[in-house]
Image: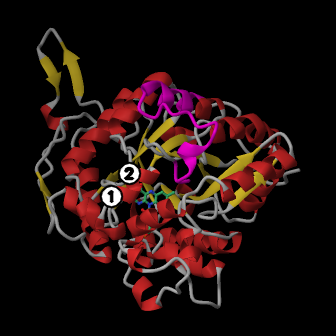
Amino acid sequence: MADSVRTMSLVGFMQASNVTVYSGAWRHPDADPGFLTAGYYQRIGQVLEQGCFDLVFFDDRLAMPGIYGDSVAETVRTGARTVKLDLSVTLGVIAAATRHLGLGATYSTTYYPPFHVARTFATLDHLSAGRAAWNVVTSVNDAEAQNFGVDVHVAHDERYDRADEFLEATFGLWDTWEDGAIIGDKASGTFADPAKVHELNYEGKHYRTRGPLTVPRCPQGRPVIIQAGSSGRGRQFASRWADLVFTNDHTHALALAHYQDQKAQVAALGRDPDAVKVLPLVYVVAAATEAEAAAEEHRLLEELVDPMASLVLLGEVTNLDFSRFGLDEPIPDDFLDTASGIRGFLDGVRAHLPGRALTLRDIAAHRATLRSSPRFVGTGPQIAEEMEHWLASGACDGFVIAATHLPGTFEQVVRYVTPELQRRGLLRDRYEGATLRENLGLARP
Ligand SMILES: Cc1cc2nc3c(=O)[nH]c(=O)nc-3n(C[C@H](O)[C@H](O)[C@H](O)COP(=O)(O)O)c2cc1C
């Protein structure tokens, strides 16, 4: 039983796609194939809201994986994140079917302009009555670059330099309307107070935008900002801008160290560390009995993932073409070290298999499979116990729960785990705030 009274934040991690982060998702016998229908997303949103989750969050990438063998053929054949719908539209349909659930979407600072992103999220925040969240990413690979007419993706640290400017510009645009600017006086014909709506005239090295935004100041002041950078430069960026930091560390020990480092960096910038929540990505496989959960884990580990899908997705995050290596060949470290995409991922795999050269099979087994993140498997009480341990030991402020199939993962979490967390006082049993910020306990800027 808990001696901690701290409650946790829960995020339902999903994709507007034929799969989840688990590449075998579409092949799961219980997977709903309706990922091209509004009802599918609305139903999942309602399940998460029933389970008192803070938000549903969608990741994104602006290309079909096409690095492996310089082709999309295996991506299309295996369904390895082949489909990705537009997220602002997807969140709009979920907003209409839910009342409290936060709505998070990923938008890239490298391929969208600040004005467009500021406008999209301010609109979503209004139309959802204060539930919008933006996951700021800088994108990872050349396939994304090529969809936007650029040959090669911008280098890692430079992407973050540009993103700093991007956020200065978007934050500026969100503040171009003061609170209370709209008067709406029909008799005098004064719609809004010109003294309360400002041009921005932002001039950076990479971005310029005049403003004002065409959307009035939004209910949350500005949308909740999510960031998931894990490199040194990424953590620095997150410390400056994020309300929520998503992490992906393979063990409790790594998560603990990451949590402490991230909070220390936030404090060093003069921000309140409690106002930035650090939430690790985990898989949850919940069932009525331990034996059922173990059987499901076995199926997810051994039966549904096509190794080719893993290799395709590995190319996507590392921006490296692995098609020239055999599955059981050791991969030279100097090749891996050229990864311009997700460096932290490779470090994670190395931490898992210390002391020997990694083969392609080793690496593939940790990409888009159940091994990609820590996993909590068992009955509701067993999983709640594990979650409580992570929270109480200072490894997190809550969790980003990845789905192995939809809506099944979330239905099982809500059925078996939510009540147990609530019984222990670790999770709210109703929404108290009017906006996502309020439910997260974050101040309105
Ligand atoms: C939960 C989670 C979700 C993420 N979602 C996305 C995403 O939607 N698109 C993307 O390009 N990167 C995504 N990333 C990757 C991060 O934004 C980041 O690029 C990665 O963790 C590597 O860190 P670095 O950029 O500092 O090297 C995600 C990471 C995590 C842990």
Residue under label 2: 76
Residue under label 1: 72
Horizontal and vertical percent position of residue 221: 37, 41
Q: Is residue 149 visible?
A: yes
Query: In terms of secondary structure, where does tag 1 sit?
Result: loop
Q: Which residues are magenta?
A: 20-46
Q: Residue at x 43, y 43 (%)?
A: 17
Which amino acid type is marked by label 2?
A: Val
* Mark 2 touches mark 1? (CB < 8 Å): yes
Query: In terms of secondary structure, where does tag 2 sit?
Result: helix
Q: Residue at x 65, y 77 (%)?
A: 352
Which amino acid type is marked by label 1?
A: Val
Which residue is at the front of the view, 154 or 39? 39
19 to the left or right of 82: right
Is residue 40 part of the magenta span, yes or no? yes
Q: Is residue 81 visible?
A: no
Which residue is at the front of the view, 293 or 121? 293
